Image (cartoon, grey):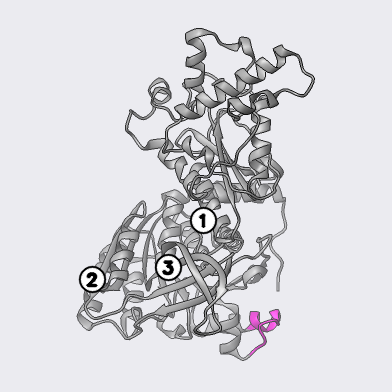
């Protein structure tokens, strides 16, 4: 077994980063078993009197595309153009899945409906970050012959418009009978590379595929070798490649990484996950990344390394997760610490959702924080004490029309007078209509940037007041803002700052990311903030995941 090619790590990281930035140019056809992944999150506080089982009090539900749909979802997150061909049943799950797939960016879905067929649905019940039960509903019978013929015609047309073809076979009945061989012949006739993600042992149906993914435990079971014996698994992969004429075999080894077996030999790519939280969906993420990399002209070695990196990122996340360009670049960056916590609005919302799945309480604090004043530090410290994870939304200079915004928090008594003082408070309220008109951004009524960043605040849960003091105190406690024994002038200055903070919060809209500043729950924690002068997302705002 050979080690990965030697070379300068910085050069390798730069090569991979350049490849990542080009993944958005990919065009991929995905044919496979579409599934609906449902999650029911809640709390368990008692045991049922009817049987010795826990009672789950459901608080919220989440539905996501699974199986081949998760491959499509990951390709969309990378910015690739995707054609998706699959089958759903004529049931509510099929309708929900169709809507979810159709809502993915850059996806052209061809979801055929078969009457009387149940859409594959997996329902997971989760409490305090632990999965209690999974309930499956599926129909694994082969699809109707006429639907299979129509699916083949659609796939042939889609191959002409895409660069790479992916077959995601979960053994749910779509890719059965003679359909896989017919699709393979069509792809070869069109000159399209084929990537196969297979569950099961029907390797002969995909003979001649350019790359095939195989879970290491399934390969070991089929070959009769011990899964822990790397040399034996590598030998089984070499024999599998030769027997079926595969260009390369990629063995999925979970937290241990990927094993690449091709004409050059066996290459072990070590795992990139710092921790393993949930293995579900990591194979789909790796498949999507490798297909996108091949579609943009990357070598197999580079594509496999990107797939290994993507799988490592997905393993550390709860449920079926997507990996975006920003996730790749953060993982490849030599920087450590707070600089890696600066993310875009979409990534922040997804991170908050992952925290919620693990049962962690999240807080959300927006603002300009330019410059960072004593009032800001106090607010952030108290917010951090009220939750387990804190997201700080930082408005960029571009969002404020190129001029630094001066928040009213912690401002001295003489900082603004008369009419100008009110203007300062309005400017400090992030997301107001006045701000958006001044910055040339979205018009009044647009959801735009505030709606996108509001996902992170909304994901933190229902708004709750945490009773932050002294800067957000009401008039009854404003004097506590100044230390005991302070002069009357100091106490007046503290009261003025508290007054301005109160006006700022009253002016903030009830919806959007400014209103989410009240979303803080009770639990000890620590927080940091990494202000930035330019947002990392297209919306002109960035979010710093402070923990």
3 or 1: tag closer to the N-terminus: 3
Q: Residues within 10 Å of mark 1 (few under 14, many from 20)?
A: some
Quadrant in which the N terminus is drawn? bottom right
Whether residue 397 appears in this view of the structure is no
Give the residues drawn in magenta, as a range: 225-235
1 or 2: tag closer to the N-terminus: 2
Considering every residue shown, the one lying at the far right of the view is 485
Q: Looking at the image, is 324 positioned above or below residue 43? A: above
Mark 1 lies on a secondary structure that is: loop
Q: Are marks 3 and 2 in contact (CB under 8 Å)?
A: no
Q: Residues within 10 Å of mark 3 (few under 14, many from 20)?
A: many
- Residue 55, percent across and down? 51, 74
Mark 3 lies on a secondary structure that is: strand
- Quick check: is 336 in the magenta stretch? no
Q: CA distance from mark 1 to mark 2?
A: 29 Å
Q: CA distance from mark 3 to mark 1?
A: 35 Å
Q: Which mark is residue 153?
A: 2
Q: Residues within 10 Å of mark 2 (few under 14, many from 20)?
A: few
Q: Residue at x 25, y 67 (%)?
A: 154
Q: Residue at x 68, y 37 (%)?
A: 381
- Residue 521, percent across and down? 59, 48
Q: Are marks 3 and 1 in contact (CB under 8 Å)?
A: no
Front tag of 3 and 2: 3
- Label 3 belongs to which residue? 38
Whether residue 453 appears in this view of the structure is yes
Considering every residue shown, the one lying at the far bottom of the view is 224
- Label 1 belongs to which residue? 298
- Residue 167, percent across and down? 40, 72
């Amino acid at each position: 077994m050979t080690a990965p090619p030697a070379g300068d790590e910085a050069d390798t990281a730069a090569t991979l980063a350049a490849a990542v930035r080009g993944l958005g140019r990919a065009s991929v056809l995905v044919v496979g078993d579409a599934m609906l992944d449902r999650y029911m999150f809640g709390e368990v506080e008692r045991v049922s009197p009817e049987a010795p089982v826990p009672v789950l009090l459901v608080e919220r539900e989440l539905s996501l595309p699974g199986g081949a749909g998760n491959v499509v979802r990951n390709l969309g997150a990378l910015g690739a153009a995707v054609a998706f061909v699959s089958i759903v049943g004529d049931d509510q799950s099929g309708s929900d899945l169709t809507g979810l797939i159709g809502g993915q960016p850059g996806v052209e879905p061809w979801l055929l409906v078969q009457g009387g067929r149940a859409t594959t649905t997996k329902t997971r019940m989760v409490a305090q970050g632990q999965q209690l039960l999974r309930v499956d509903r599926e129909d694994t019978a082969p699809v109707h012959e006429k639907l299979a013929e129509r699916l083949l015609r659609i796939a042939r047309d889609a191959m002409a418009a895409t660069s790479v073809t992916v077959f995601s076979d979960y053994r749910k009945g779509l890719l059965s009978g003679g359909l896989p061989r017919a699709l393979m012949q069509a792809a070869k006739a069109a000159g399209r590379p084929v990537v196969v993600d297979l569950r099961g042992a029907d390797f002969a149906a995909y003979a001649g595929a350019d790359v095939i993914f195989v879970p290491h435990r399934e390969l070991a079971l089929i070959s009769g070798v011990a899964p822990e014996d790397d040399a034996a698994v590598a030998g089984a992969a070499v024999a599998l490649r030769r027997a079926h004429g595969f260009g390369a075999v990629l063995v999925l080894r979970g937290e241990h990484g990927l094993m690449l077996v091709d004409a050059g030999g066996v290459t072990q790519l070590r795992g990139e996950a710092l921790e393993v939280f949930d293995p579900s969906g990591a194979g789909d993420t790796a498949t999507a990344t490798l297909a996108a990399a091949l579609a943009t002209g990357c070598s197999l070695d580079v594509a496999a390394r990107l797939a290994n990196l993507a799988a490592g990122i997905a393993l550390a996340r709860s449920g079926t997760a997507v990996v975006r360009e920003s996730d790749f670049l953060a993982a490849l960056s030599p920087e450590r610490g707070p600089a890696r916590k600066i993310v875009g609005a979409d990534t922040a919302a997804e991170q908050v959702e992952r925290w919620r799945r693990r049962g962690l309480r999240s807080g959300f604090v927006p603002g300009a924080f330019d410059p960072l004043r004593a009032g800001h530090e106090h607010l952030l410290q108290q917010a951090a004490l009220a939750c387990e994870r804190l997201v700080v939304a930082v408005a960029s200079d571009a969002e404020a029309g190129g001029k630094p915004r001066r928040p009213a928090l912690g401002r001295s008594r003489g900082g603004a007078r008369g009419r100008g003082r009110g203007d300062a408070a309005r400017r400090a309220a992030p997301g107001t209509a006045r701000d958006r008109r001044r910055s040339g951004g979205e018009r009044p009524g647009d959801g735009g940037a505030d709606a996108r960043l509001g996902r992170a605040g909304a994901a933190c849960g229902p708004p709750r007041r945490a009773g932050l003091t002294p800067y957000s105190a009401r008039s009854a406690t404003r004097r506590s803002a100044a230390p005991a024994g302070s002069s009357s002038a100091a106490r007046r200055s503290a009261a003025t700052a508290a007054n301005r903070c109160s006006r700022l919060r009253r002016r903030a809209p009830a919806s959007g990311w400014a209103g989410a500043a009240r979303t803080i729950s009770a639990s000890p924690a620590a927080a940091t903030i990494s202000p930035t002068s330019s947002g990392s997302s297209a919306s002109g705002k960035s979010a710093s995941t402070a923990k």
